[in-house]
Image (tube, rainbow, N blue to C red):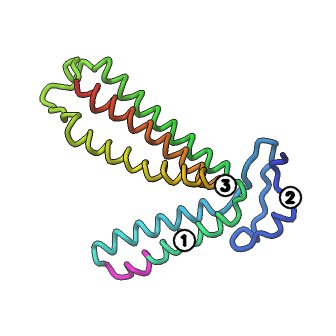
Amino acid sequence: MNLNRNASYRKSKKGLEAGIRFSAQEHPYHLVDPSPWPLLGSLGALASTIGAIIYMHSFTGDRALLTLGLGLILYTMFVWWRDVTWLRYGFFLSIVSEVMFSLAFFWAFLHSSSAPAVEIGAIRPPQGIEVLNPWGIPFLNTLILLLSGAAVTWAHYAILAGSLHHFGFEAAARYRYSVDVVRLFLFASIYWWGGK
């Protein structure tokens, strides 16, 4: 698969990018072209944040700046997604980043729980911290979240029984199952084991 974009794609871009010439050297692992959309989105986020702050303090021009910022964000979303043809890579990288965040979170929790710092008395949980009963609210919340996956499972089997195959639903169902596994691990490690 050739990862470089062709010349006709570059010529077809409109808007802010039309007058900008990039001199970045591409290589076989280069996935995206240099683009003004991240900068424009950042400016939109800055304008909407400042606009929201001055709106909360009732300054003049508050709604105009907030509206401009939100408009820039929406425009950036539209043109960026229009230009991006590598959405499957973006989805894959999003899932990978979520997995890495979960692993880092659990690693940090398990590390600090198995070897508590001297500053907190070298005990886990620290003195003065009351731990929740894992079989109360945490168990109820986990149960509700896991049972909500029953509707997804039921719909999945209904689609399979009708000999229909919809990739989007299959991907969403598999993602949902993996999230349920993470929820079970979260309950077991944080509430049950971590509270001992």
Task: Where is residue 194? Give x, y as percent.
Answer: 28, 27
Residue 120 vertical placement versus 31 (above, below): above
Task: Please state if 74 lies on the left or on the right of 24 as rendered.
Answer: left
Give the residues in magenta: 59-66
Tag 1–tag 3 contact (CB < 8 Å): no
Tag 3–tag 2 contact (CB < 8 Å): no
Q: Secondary structure at mark 3?
A: helix
Tag 2–tag 1 contact (CB < 8 Å): no
Please, what is the three-letter code of the amino acid marked with disc 1? Leu
CA distance for labels 1 and 3:
18 Å
Question: Would you name the residue on which mark 3 appears?
Answer: 87
Q: Earlier in the sequence, mark 1 or mark 3?
A: 1
Please, what is the three-letter code of the amino acid marked with disc 3? Leu
- Which mark is drawn over residue 74? 1
CA distance for labels 3 and 2:
18 Å
Please tell me whether residue 55 belongs to the stretch shown in magenta: no
Question: Would you name the residue on which mark 2 appears?
Answer: 6
Task: Please state if 85 lies on the left or on the right of 147 as rendered.
Answer: right
Magenta span: predominant SS is helix
